[in-house]
Image (spheres, rainbow, N blue to C red):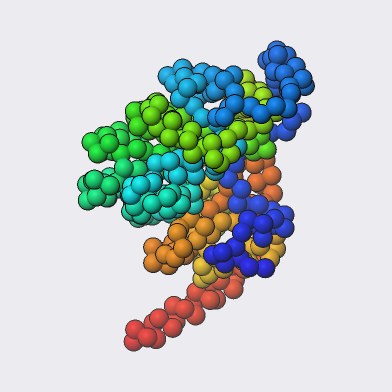
Amino acid sequence: MNHGPNATKKEFQSCQYSLSNSFAQPLTQPELVRLTADRHRNDLLDLYQKHDLEYVPNGCSLDLRRDIARVIYHDELSAEHILVFPGGQVALQTASLACARDGCRSVVFTPGYQSTVESPLWAADNGGITEIERRPEDGWRVDLDEVRKAIRGNENTTKFLILNEPWNPGGILMTLETQSELIRVCRENDTIVLCDEVYRLLEHEPSGETRLPSMAAAYEKGISAVTMSKPWGGCGITIGWLACRDLSIIRKLIDVQYFGTACVSRASEIQGRMVLASSDFILKERLEIIRTNKESLRIFIEERYREWFSWKRPNAGAIAFVKFEGPWTAEDLGRHLAEVGISIKPAYCFVRKVGVKERGLVDYFRVGFGERKFPLALEKFAEFVESHEDSWRRSRNVDNTQRDFVTT
């Protein structure tokens, strides 16, 4: 089985214990029906049972877009500012195809979710990308000096920037001050900002005090990308959207969307409305799972096996970027784990083509901790660690002896 840089998701489907999934606990249809009935939304249940199978309007039916505007954006945006897609992946690709064309140069951050790093290169006549590194020694923060340099160095062509906040793979959320300054720099250059916000609403602080304004609400040329799979666990509903206050940008997005996947199914739209009708309850329950699992992962990394693992503790989402301190690379670790049915996501999944070694990321891998079954997978990982600790120590001692020999 190939688990190298060109490995696909299919090759990991045989892994029984997933530490690589990045979504919150998935909903079930019976659960969604029960939640909808508990809120006396029989109108939605009837609509789901009786809807026809005609095409829905391009960009989604008005009722779902209105619900998104009300529930997610508290009517700061309206239905006309929202376009719905069959999942967040298509939404991200559409935004880049619309905004990174005609010689436009784009700023992206690495390591990062593949579409937030590479999608501008898929646009016709794109002007290339400037990659800004997020570094572990800086706590994975966005370096605003590098942003200023990237934009001002190509100010006539750099008109598109892609963020991922909260950040995938690390579950790290920038501060409000950083967001405000980044918007100011982009506003000065009339640069569009696409922010992948799929983990927004999953901030770990109970008060939600670290939550940032959505980019669509905070910046007139900001585009927010959202999907129902991550915060609400509505993976199979396959609903994502883009939100933007600038209607001229919305029209560009519509033009590209029309030649891609112009509309979703009516069944998915209605399920999406059911999710939004119970949004507060679903998010509260998913966050309880995430916080409990995060504490188990903290104990695993900081107490039980601190000899072998380290991290920057995440503050949002259901993911963490972990460093393996043992004698293998994270890719080797992933391969050995896969052999015993455990999956992780090594760092090569989050950088473009080459550069894992050059960027000092060979020891990093992503862990997802959003599901109820996470504790079982983590305990299987613990069993694996304990069965290899002695050999890792021997290997490390050999390496140290060899280094000492060379030094002397």
Examine the rendered structure and indicate whether residue 60 appears above or below residue 174.
Answer: above
Residue at the image position 56 percent from the left and 71 percent from the top: 392
377 versus 73 height, above or below: below
Q: Position of residue 119 (x, y in %)?
A: 46, 49
Residue 274 found in image quarter:
top right
Pick the residue in front: 398 or 323: 323
Which residue does the image show at 51% across and 30% down from the upper left?
83
- Residue drawn 66% across the image and 52% down it: 18
Q: Which picture quadrant has residue 372?
A: top right
Q: Is residue 139 above or below residue 292?
A: below
Q: Would residue 281 be seen by someone viewing this image from the given angle? A: no
Question: Which quarter of the rendering shows the C terminus?
Answer: bottom left
Whether residue 374 is visible, yes or no, is: yes
Q: Nearer the viewer, residue 295 or 7?
A: 7
Q: Quadrant of the N terminus?
A: bottom right
Tally of numbered tags: 0
Q: Residue 288 or 129: which is nearer the viewer?
A: 129
Q: Is residue 325 above or below residue 210?
A: below
Image location of residue 201, percent across then percent down: 50, 31
- Horizontal side of 111 relative to 384 (left or right) equals left
Q: Whole-percent x and y of residue 138?
A: 33, 51
Q: Position of residue 64 (x, y in %)?
A: 59, 22
